[in-house]
Image (tube, rainbow, N blue to C red):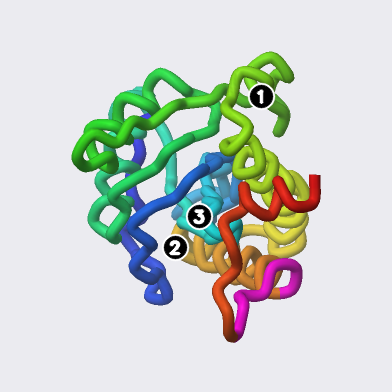
Amino acid sequence: MNTSLISERDPEDQPLCRSYVSVLFNPISARVSGKADTHPMPMLWAIGVLYDGQPDYLGSWVASGPKDSQWLAIAEDLKARGVERIRFIIGPSPTEMQAAVTARCCTGNWHCTALPISRMAIAPSVIDALLPGHRPYIERVLEVATPLGARLKRALARHGSFASAAAAAALLRQSTKRYINAKWPEPETVPAPPLRAQHATTG
């Protein structure tokens, strides 16, 4: 899927954090009105988890064409918005994802590992092979993305057709931000400890 990055950029797009422990990409389809008819527009949206366990919305992209070109375009967009490190990337095209993100969003000696996903699930053998300190970040991104994916599909269905891909992207962003702010509000005072430390304490 060669990505046509949304030319009508969502004006609310913000710079991103430099480093994410885990990032999950998930496909979705929006209906966009053309000159002659309304047609489905394949898109990808992404959610990331920071070192302290806080989820963060990375954005959405229009996708079509060869996979390697798609992921390079997405990685270039993430880099342009400030991303320098992604430890684990999860999504439907692990080989292409890993190559693109390693080339564009991994500075220095940082290594990016791609994990395959099917129907919002990662094989137990893949989870078991991770270091104990990494597992909570994979679990957290799945915890956020699984209900969020269903929420975004409902939001698109309720809206119907969009005038442009940028309009669909804006709705995805707004719906995701509301969900994250309600479920995982940012701490107001003392920063939260790393997620793996929380996991060790509660586990």
Dot 3: few (<14), some (14–19), or many (≥20) neighbours within 10 Å? some
Is 185 magenta? The answer is yes
Q: Residue furthest front?
A: 201
Q: CA distance from mark 2 to mark 3?
A: 30 Å
Q: Which residue matches tag 2?
A: 166
Element assignment for label 3: loop
- Residue 52 at what x, y percent from top left? 55, 59
* Image vertical order of residue 67 relative to residue 40, above or below: above
Q: Amino acid at mark 2?
A: Ala
Q: Secondary structure at mark 2?
A: helix
- At a point 23% along the width and 32% down the height, the residue shown is 103
Q: Is residue 113 above or below residue 76?
A: above
Residue position for label 1: 127
Percent across and percent down for residue 161 are: 62, 58
Near-viewer residue (176 or 110): 110
Q: Nearer the viewer, residue 22 or 147?
A: 22
Please state which of the two labelled residues, at mark 2 or mark 3, is closer to the viewer.
Answer: 3
Label number found at residue 31: none
Number of other residues with Cα within 10 Å of mark 2, as a class: few under 14, some 14 to 19, many 20 or more: many
Amino acid type, label 3:
Tyr
Q: Position of residue 94 (x, y in %)?
A: 47, 22
Q: Which residue is mark 3?
A: 51
Determine the CA span between mark 1 and mark 3. 18 Å
Question: Magenta span: helix, strand or loop, mainly?
Answer: loop
Q: Amino acid at mark 1?
A: Ile
User: Is there CB contact under 8 Å for labels 1 and 3?
Assistant: no
Q: How many marks?
A: 3
Q: Which residues are magenta?
A: 182-188
Residue at 57% across, 36% down? 134
Quadrant in the picture for residue 190: bottom right
